[in-house]
Image (cartoon, rainbow, N blue to C red):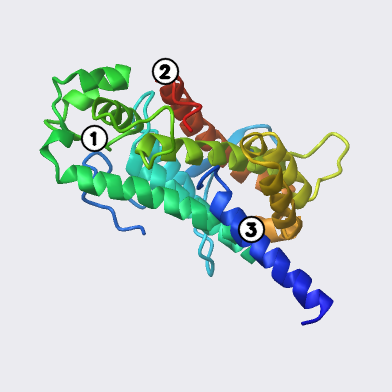
């Protein structure tokens, strides 16, 4: 084997290892029966766009992009559905949002796509926990149960349903797993709460990356996606990773496509249009992130091992 072949093989092995460690000890889709509060309708979200000619706020439909797996309209639809509860996050559309974000990462090439495998494993853990809980009578939360308190101002919506499953939302999952003693604050477990925390950290990384990708600096110089993704990583996930994983991540970001690829991926023609689309996505992600952050913080779960 030549020197170049050995180097390529070494990089591949390194990135495979990165995928297994990406979310600090770990970073499928047909899950319709576990949740009763989310009726998925294929509505196309609309985005606000300011016209430069008259300054009026217009609205344009975010259309499906033909010929590709990742769809921005689908991602935005799931994100908005996940925030249906005030101050809470519905788990099914939340995980469906991750399904679409995985497609986004896989579209960026095999190097970056390796990271998505670990994210898939995390969404699968929560889905499997929900399916097992659905079969258990103890996982059914009565509307008069103290579980109402975990949703705070969502209590009225919880009471509108006779029974709410334990993995219906972020707060109901946290309450259920705490009540059942499934959350361990001293060692790693496959609890839904610990798994959610890893996904939560990765969501901040993607939010910051998309935000940077949407911006047009005052200097007019647009940073390369590789640079922007590296900066987003250094300000988020890097804090939770070892030196070795951080170095391996740098290799993955080198393979990031150029900006023109993202225009095609999101179905826009230029940076201005990219800003409109991604700003809406970033805002929706931010709402989900803030609600999840609040729920985890209230229950002392931001540093679960």
Which residue is depicted at the point 43% across and 48% down? 122
Could you classify mark 1 by the number of other residues whose Cα lies within 10 Å: few (under 14), some (14-19), or many (20 or more)? many
Q: Which residue is mark 2?
A: 298
Q: Which of the two labelled residues, at mark 3 and mark 1, occupies the earlier sequence position?
A: 3
Q: Which residue is mark 3?
A: 112
Residue 142 in view in this figure: yes
Left or right placement of residue 24 versus residue 272 in this view: left
Residue 264 in view in this figure: no
Whether 137 is drawn above or below 28: the answer is above
Query: Would you say the residues marked 3 and 1 are in contact, meaning their CB atoms lie under 8 Å apart?
Result: no
What number is the disc on residue 11?
A: none
Which residue is depicted at the point 27% across and 29% down? 181
The quarter of the picture where the N terminus appears is: bottom right
Q: In x, y percent, where is residue 164?
A: 19, 33
As helix, strand or loop, the secondary structure at mark 1 comes to loop
Pick out the residue farthest to the front.
187
Q: Which residue is mark 1?
A: 166
As helix, strand or loop, the secondary structure at mark 3 comes to helix
Q: Quarter of the image holding residue 3?
A: bottom right
Query: Would you say the residues marked 3 and 2 are in contact, meaning their CB atoms lie under 8 Å apart?
Result: no
Could you classify mark 2 by the number of other residues whose Cα lies within 10 Å: few (under 14), some (14-19), or many (20 or more)? few
As helix, strand or loop, the secondary structure at mark 2 comes to helix
Whether 256 is drawn above or below 153: the answer is below
From mark 3 to mark 2, how far is it between C-alphas? 33 Å
Whether 4 is drawn above or below 284: the answer is below
Q: Quarter of the image holding residue 110?
A: bottom right
Q: Nearer the viewer, residue 113 or 272?
A: 113
Whether 259 is drawn above or below 110: the answer is above
């Amino acid at each position: 084997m030549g020197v170049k072949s050995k180097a390529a093989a070494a990089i591949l092995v390194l990135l495979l290892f990165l995928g297994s460690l990406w979310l600090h000890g770990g970073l499928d889709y047909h899950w319709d029966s576990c949740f009763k509060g989310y009726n998925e309708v294929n509505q196309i979200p609309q985005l606000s766009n300011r016209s430069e000619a008259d300054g009026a706020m217009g609205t344009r439909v975010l259309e499906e992009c033909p010929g590709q797996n990742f769809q921005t309209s689908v991602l935005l639809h799931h994100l908005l559905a996940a925030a249906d509860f005030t101050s809470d996050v519905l788990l099914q559309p939340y995980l469906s949002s991750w399904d679409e974000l995985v497609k986004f990462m896989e579209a960026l090439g095999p190097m970056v796509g390796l990271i998505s495998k670990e994210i898939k494993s995390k969404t699968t853990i929560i889905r499997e926990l929900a399916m097992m809980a659905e079969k258990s009578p103890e996982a059914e939360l009565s509307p008069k149960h103290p579980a109402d308190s975990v949703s705070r101002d969502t209590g009225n919506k919880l009471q509108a349903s006779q029974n709410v499953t334990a993995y219906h939302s972020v707060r109901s999952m946290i309450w259920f797993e705490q009540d059942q003693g499934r959350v361990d604050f001293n060692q790693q477990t496959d609890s839904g709460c610990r798994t959610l925390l890893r996904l939560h950290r990765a969501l901040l990384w993607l939010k910051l990356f998309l935000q940077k990708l949407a911006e047009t600096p005052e200097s007019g110089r647009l940073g390369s996606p590789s640079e922007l993704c590296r900066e987003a990583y250094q300000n988020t996930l890097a804090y939770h990773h070892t030196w070795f994983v951080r170095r391996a991540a740098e290799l993955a970001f080198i393979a990031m496509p150029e900006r023109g690829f993202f225009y095609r991926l999101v179905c826009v023609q230029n940076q201005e249009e990219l800003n409109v689309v991604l700003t809406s996505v970033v805002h929706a992600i931010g709402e989900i992130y803030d609600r999840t952050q609040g729920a985890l913080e209230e229950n002392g779960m931001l540093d679960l091992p």
